[in-house]
Amino acid sequence: MGIRFVRLPSPRRAAAAGGRAPSAPRGGACAAAARCAARALIAACAAAASGAAAPAEAARLRVAASTTDLASIAASVGGGRIEAFAIARPTADVHRVEALPSHMVRVSRARVYLKVGLGLDQWADAVIDGSRNARLEVVDCSRGVRVLEKPAGRVDYAMGDVHPGNPHYWLDPRNGAVVARTVAEALARVDPEGAAGYRARAAEFAEACAAAWTRERAHAEAMGIRTVFTYHRSWTYFADAFGFEIAGTVEPVPGIPPTARHLASLVEVARRRGVPVLIREPYFSGEAGRFLARQAGVREVIAAASCADAAPGSYLAHIDAVLAAIDPASAGKGHP
């Protein structure tokens, strides 16, 4: 599901935290038109906004993020000193986000951009490049997290949508704690006066993540569910964190729709092993879930891989909500 871009020399751009500035993907004529439109919008909006913001609002550091999860973590770490917002909608497929002029305008006003990394949000490079924001601090939030499913040996297109490792690391709250510390250091670099507060709030957030992991791990163990199906490999970290085994995925390889033969094999696995649940993101087709429900009694849980919004607390609340939806005691009470 990744997007392939042709990389051309990039205009001025701030260096990514801890490394080189990210390369900017180019999407041909459409992307070029979007960048031209964005530049005109940026100039107009900058002129209109100059002097219009209230002093308190103007003093807040704007932090852009590819996903609501990263934005929510940033909001928890930044407190009242920052304003965090996400580019991708929480129900969007983060592999496939179109870089729009409106995104570039918003990022042109930001001081920090938080990327998921591991090849998931390559489209963010087009947003960053189109923003023409030379002061932007670009942060790869995958730095330091425990990465699962790193490809070994020869990698080719037959393996589907392959990344340097599974990029959905935020669905383990232990990785969320690592991200919080990374964000705190990035904010401290651009706002040294707030450094102590950022680091203190990151430490508090890490404690909250540890408590959430302990609480929800016990919740998962009490459910009596040990195996699940997932549609995509989005839930690998979630399963690892809370003690589930992924018995199979609807996609035979990442990004490839299932065949009838593959679905039949999942029915056989479900019957033989008693797999009770399929976790599916809302942007995937529900046809496979209905088939597995008819043939093997598998219950489908529709859950976005990202939290609802960028508010502080939204990130951990979403993880709690997904566990509650999987719990048979909560079945039929809605989706996270």
Image (spheres, grey):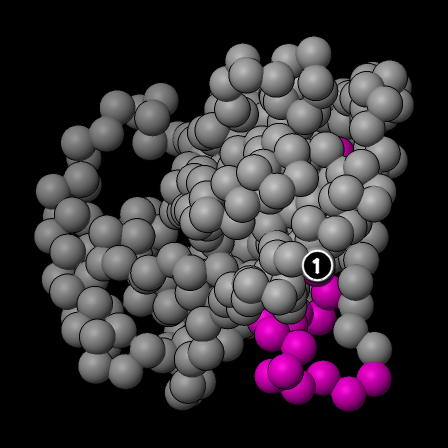
Residue 258 in sight in this render: yes
> Does residue 42 show up magenta in the picture?
no
Magenta span = 153-176
Residue furthest out toward the front: 295
In the shown orientation, is residue 284 left or right of residue 298? left
Residue 307: horizontal and vertical position, in percent? 53, 32
Please name the residue shown 33% across and 31% down the image. Answer: 58
The residue that appears at 70% across and 18% down in the rendered structure is: 328
Quarter of the rendering containing residue 55? top left
- Coordinates of residue 290 in the picture (x, y in percent): 51, 40
Q: Residue drawn 67% across and 39% down? A: 296
Q: Is residue 264 left or right of residue 14?
A: right
Q: Which residue is mark 1?
A: 265
Three-letter code, disc 1: Ser
Left of 236 or right of it: where is 45?
A: left
Q: Residue at x 11, y 52 (%)?
A: 44
Mark 1 neighbour density, 10 Å: few (under 14) some (14–19) many (20 or more): few
Q: Is residue 163 magenta?
A: yes
Image location (x, y in percent) of residue 254: 61, 65
Residue 132, compared with residue 222, is above or below; it is: below
Is 22 left or right of 109, judged from the image as shown? right
Count of numbered circles on the image: 1
One can see residue 246 in this view:
no
In the depicted view, which residue is nearer to us: 247 or 44? 247
The picture places residue 78, in percent across and down from the top left corner, at 57, 30
Instruction: Indicate the secondary structure of the residue bearing disc 1.
Output: helix
Choose between 51 and 30: the one closer to the eye.
30
